[in-house]
Amino acid sequence: MLLILDILTTAGILFVVSIGLLAVFGVLKIINFAHGAWLTIGAYCAVVAAKLGLNPWAALPLAFVIGGALGGLAEHFIIRPLYRRPLDAILATWGLGIVIGQLITLGFGRDVQMTPNLFSGTVEVFGADYSAYRLVALGAAVVIGVAFALTIEGTRLGLSARAVIMNETLARGLGIDTARVRLFTFMIGAGLAALAGVLLTPLTSVDPNMGVSWLIGAFMLVMVADASFLALGVACLVFGAAQVLISTFVSPILGSIAIAVLAALVLRISPKGFSRA
Amino acid sequence: MSDAARQSADSRGGALTLDGVTSGYGAVSIVKGVSLKVAPGEIVALLGKNGMGKTTLLKTILGMVGLRGGAIAVDGVSVAGLSPAKLVALGVGYAPQEQPLFQDLSIRDNLRLAVSSDRLLPAALERVFGHFPFLADRLAQRAGTLSGGEQKMLILARALMLKPRLLLIDEISEGLQPSVVDRIAAALSAERAASGATMLIVEQNLDFALRVADRWAVLKLGEIDDEGATSPDARERILRHLSV
Amino acid sequence: MPDDVSALGRAARPERGRARLSRTAPFVAAGLAAVALWIAPLVLDTFAVNVLTRSMIYAVLAVTVDLLWGFAGILTFGQAAFFGVGAYATAMALTYLGATPAWIAVALALAVAAPMALGLAVGWLSFYHRSTALYASVISLVTPIVVTQLIYSGGEWTGSSSGLVGFDVLPLELEGFFRLAAFVLIAVTLAAWVFVRSDAGRALIAVRDNDARCAYLGLSPKRLQIALTAVLAGVAGLAGFVFANASSVVAPENAGFLFGTELVIWVALGGRGTLLGPVLGTIAIDYLAANLSGDLPFLWQLLLGTAFVAVIILLPGGLAELARRAWGALPVGRRSGFAPRLVVSPPRPEADASDGPLLKIDGLAKSYGSLTVLENIDLDIRAGELVSLVGPNGAGKTTLMRCLSDGTEPFEGAVSIAGVSTAGLTPNRIVTLGVGRKFQVASVFESLTVADCLLLARAPHDGLSALGRAETLTLPQAALDVLRMTGLDRMLAEPTRLLSHGQKQALELAMVVALEPRVILLDEPTAGLTKAERTTIGAVLKTLTADLGIAAVLVEHDLDFVRQISSRIVVLHQGRLVLDGTVDEVVNSELVRTIYSGGAHV
């Protein structure tokens, strides 16, 4: 039973961490390797919020806004010149991630930062104690997923973004300002990454390089999901389950590479990953 | 401005002037020095075999393919270098030929993408329901599930949403049964009667083109090979250019 | 480009002398570098010797990354993994077996063989028919992560997170390791230099530019990419061997993904696609890092990261690009390309003159989901025929061409070339059956010269030298005719990106003809050409079919052109073959007139 909870909460966390990357990849067709840096930015927003004496939950909107604003700058100056060179965009965003990591180091030092717990303690589930925060994180994943789905399905920006994903040429021909759609999408993706960074703070130590360890997993999940929001959910569940099961029954080290290896194999067999299912 | 005043101000189509237009992709120029004038409210059919540059010319006017030489003006104002979004805002409607619909989106969303704000949607929908009433009952249906003829009507409806002053239409009659071709021809005539829109239509269906248009031009290898009015002797003259 | 045009007029003799000079230059440079690096440890302090030893080993890795990414276009983060495997193989062998000469030799063999085996596996995983460049990069990212985790899980065998320390190594002093690293670096760089300048080196660039064209020349881009991955994995392993010996420490970071990205950063800053750029860049950056990172550790990383982003966006050629621009501005820096002498190949003995059709299509049908694009196509084409496929847009002509040239394309029915079925064959295998395909958009190698493009087209017949440039280029008479008629024979040293559209079309045709195919598939060979160019191409096609007995299938929209050169015309309409007849029959057909006036509905 606890194993199922572990799987669900792991999938939820993976989903929260990957969703921003997915949005950017879907619309911009660019892999944002600075995604990890935005997770870090979000986590440091929580640090700053704590230093300012704000309610820990206030870090969430703060991170979304700051992440989004910085994302806008990055899109304009770094991503936009590289739309026609997608492999170079991977490199430039990776370089951007290094720069952000070092700026954070210069500002806050390289030590691990303490953040206040968003939600502490345990709850009793099926007769066993379970980390309350992991359940909160699962709830947050569901909320973010639903909000994301509503944005995509219900708003004009969501419609325009879907149009750009499906057929960018046609979208342009209908007078949709695709450059603006890209900018807004990148800002939202960056904002979501920062939001995820705040949500990660109780689960992981906060240091200038914390984002990198999450980047590869998120990247592989997005590759398998191939810009499909639902496929990302499925991929998080399947690979999250694989990770939990392998970690529990085989070895934690093999569990930590389960997502990368399995995703690579899935892509080898079916280049479009889970999105066709 | 009152509605009536806007009506009268808009009820004139835009004048399109092409002067030595050259454009293409990569190293290749596909359209080479095309000059053409379309008067307000006029319908001109652009004919020619495949690969002769018709579609590229439409895309160049719309700003989707870069202009390499020459000038394009709408109502005497140069539109060279403007983005498609700007041209649509100026009152240009476009019905593309290749992958013309978002197959997985609903009819409503396909139409909605043609207006810049949802506030304009109800009036625009009413407008196109006038031309194609069947759309009104099927807004929630996925565009990909429509029949070929219905899809073509949806493409045209979408181009008419904002009451364009200049319509660019690419092979709207392709692969259609005669009855659907008739409905589309009727819609184009009705639209011009109502709004005075100017139209440049790319066609391979000669009979349809001659029925709808006032004038025609044949494009060959990116240049205008022949042009004239749609007089009774036009058909034979054009066929000489088109057949084997 | 006025310089290049004037270069064409120069006499051939000084060109040859120049070519010989430029062939010996790398060896002279390598010799000088070797002497300088032999002396260097005597004048440098211990710290510098230590650091530069490491820097030079990293520079070897940079060469391998550069060959993969800069030359062959494969962005890889995986070289760190192969380096790590080589280093760990060495460290484990020396730790558990000992450092006797025999075991050191075993360690060396393991350090090269183990990464090569892994490289083969990674290559096989990364490169397959229709694989994408992004997928190869994804695999190259996963590889170091997996290797690192395996090292962590290796317990005391691999020393887990602390690595292996203090094993016995080659009996060399500090200077000795410096010289060993220098020797390996010079040897690897020189070998890479000779290779990329050789005829075979052109193939790397060709795969990067246009791997579809490579496949349709009968080359196997995937096999080349796999071989390159495996060999360069071995070279990285060799660097790992030197590293383990020189430092006497190996750690999981040496195999890690972060180290893999650092290698890419060094190569990018130095200048991908050049060899000296990445070598000098790596040494300079690593040496500077060792000196600066003590004083300003974070600032240094910040500057490096910023420079990297700026170079990727603004100066994709790296610092070498800057140097090249400066050099190109000097009069001595201008150099015209190398061009071989053209030789006519002896005419091939007439292939089996049997009466059977060369190309046979039997009940071919293809659909995308519920949309039927082609149905029930039957067609026989014999030697010497020139069959034109015509029909309005969307009739299925290009799809049919694709089905003929790629047996892995899913379709029903059968296609056979001279009696051999093409079912399941990749394009390069079909080329070896004697099929040449000319694409609609001129498909040549933009970074190569005219002569190089032709050389690659001859590779299936004449092979490619991995050591140098052939002095002569042997072409069949028909290919030479194409070149002469279009003036390309006087532009052999010209980079193809400077050619006009018509010249590119002619070059591609010459490349396809150089394959000496029995069947030639041409998709709109005259699209975008001038009247004169069309006439030339038409004359060439007539010669190929009527005189040489090649069977040609032509998709063409210019019906005047079709009328003039075809021996038969086949009309496709809405995916079906509606007419197959002589030029006169088709031209006078009422059905065809109806189809082209847009009215016909079958």
Image (tube, rainbow, N blue to C red):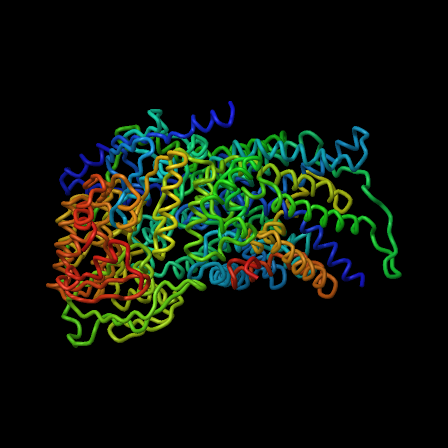
Expressed as whole percent of the image width and height from the top left, the position of residue B120 reads 54, 35
Q: Relative to A54, is B172 on the left or the right?
A: left
Residue C455, by quadrant, is: bottom left
Expressed as whole percent of the image width and height from the top left, the position of residue C323 reads 38, 32
**Location of the C terminus of chain C (image quadrant):** bottom left
> Outermost residue, left direction?
C547
Q: Relative to C196, is C351 on the left or the right?
A: left
Q: Residue at x 71, y 49 (%)?
A: A141
Expressed as whole percent of the image width and height from the top left, the position of residue B131 reads 45, 45
- Please tell me which residue lies in front, B37 or C215: B37
Please state the total of marks drawn on the protein image.
0
Q: Is residue B8 visible?
A: yes
Q: Is residue C124 above or below residue C301?
A: below
Q: Residue at x 52, y 44 (%)?
A: A30
- Please tell me which residue lies in front, B178 or C240: B178
- Please tell me which residue lies in front, C230 or A184: A184
**Location of the N terminus of chain C (image quadrant):** top left
Q: Relative to C311, is A240 on the left or the right?
A: right
Expressed as whole percent of the image width and height from the top left, the position of residue C226 reads 43, 60
- Please tell me which residue lies in front, C119 or A75: A75
Q: Is residue C413 above or below residue C255?
A: below
